[in-house]
Image (tube, rainbow, N blue to C red):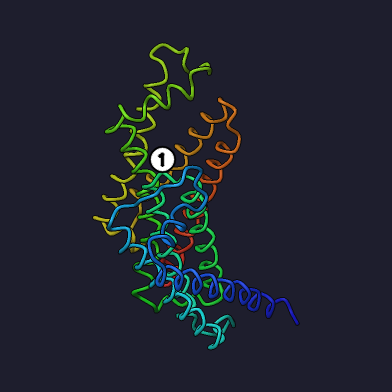
Amino acid sequence: MNSLSLKSLIIIPVGVGLIFTMLINGWTLLTGGDTTHLEYLNYYNRTNVDQYPSYYTILLYLTAVLQLIASVFLAIALIEREFLADKNAKFFKWGIFFSILSVVLYGFMVRLLSNHGASATMYFYVGVLYFCLWYIEQNDNNLNHKIFTRIKILPIYFTIFYTMGFPGWQKIVNSTEVMGGYIKLFSNSFLSKIPGGIEPFIYFLGILEISVPILLILSLIKKEFLLNIPTQFLDWSIFISVCTFVMLSLGLGVVLNYPGSTNLIFYAVFTMGLYSYICTSKRAIKTCSL
């Protein structure tokens, strides 16, 4: 078995794993009730929530449907042997895309519930799935799937939008509710001794975070997600996100919160990975149009 065949076959166990993961989770969410939905929303949560907004029920069922569709598409992809280099991997691509959509939706819900552990895990999950999509595209590299090519990075927009937008909104608009927690967190650090205290830093971080959704909206208006024009607004939104994650990591490092600090470095690295996928896709589209 040569290296070329291994390169094609190595994606098979990943595809099988995704099929079972999406199928089991999707079916459980679809057939379960409030108790099951609460269990899913409380994964990784330190303080369990006992209720959720009514519209979450619709989002949870939508997540379930997306996961079931993903499992079907991925199964067809394996049956059609789309993992081979000479195959058109359209079902594989769509299967991973629907998997990404389901993870993004779930991440959105747990983010708004302040389930930071789950939202971080889903953020990293999105990054890993885009890596899988990149791997499939390296073997296939078929840009004839026009609809797919046009929408494939939109989940990245939404993921970064709520990841940065929600905490930015909290710091700027709901500062009276959250500022006390930040003051208490940094009360014994040198930051609290600086003239003006910790508040200016929190507001500055909030401004950075809230600027990211604004840039993403401008990027959407300019249709930068098509990747056939310069993506200046998208690029700046990702750059600011990475810088903000690093600053937040340094802040938690100051108060010796090493797990949180490390987690934020992961955020920065995975965001850079998503940007790398965008750049690779842009180069592929540019090469195809020549």
Residue found at the far bottom of this picture? 80
Quarter occupied by the N terminus: bottom right
Quadrant in the picture for the C terminus? bottom left
Q: Quadrant of residue 33?
A: bottom left
For badge 1, the amino acid type reads Ile
> Where's residue 135, x and y in %?
56, 69
287 or 134: nearer the viewer: 134
Q: Is residue 117 left or right of residue 58?
A: right
Q: Residue at x 38, y 59 (%)?
A: 105
| Residue 62 horizontal side relative to residue 268, left or right | left
Image check: 205 left or right of 266?
A: left
Residue at the right extreme of this rendering: 1
Q: Could you say which quadrant of the image residue 153 lies in?
A: bottom left
Q: Which residue is mark 1?
A: 240
x and y percentages locating residue 21 in the rendered image: 54, 70
Q: Nearer the viewer, residue 160 or 257?
A: 257
Q: Position of residue 15 (x, y in %)?
A: 57, 75
Which residue ends up furthest to the left in the rendered image?
221
- The image shows a total of numbered marks equal to 1
Residue 78 location (% of width, % of height): 55, 83
Q: Secondary structure at mark 1?
A: helix
Picture residue at 54% right of the left edge, 47% below the top: 269
Along the line of sight, which residue is nearer the eye, 275 or 208?
A: 208
Badge 1 density bin: few <14, some 14–19, many ≥20, Cα 10 Å: some
Q: Relative to residue 63, is residue 238 depicted above or below?
A: above
Residue 114 visible within the image: yes
**Residue at 36% in and 30% down:** 178
**From where the camera sits, is residue 289 visible?**
no
Instruction: Identify the image quadrant of residue 169.
Output: top left
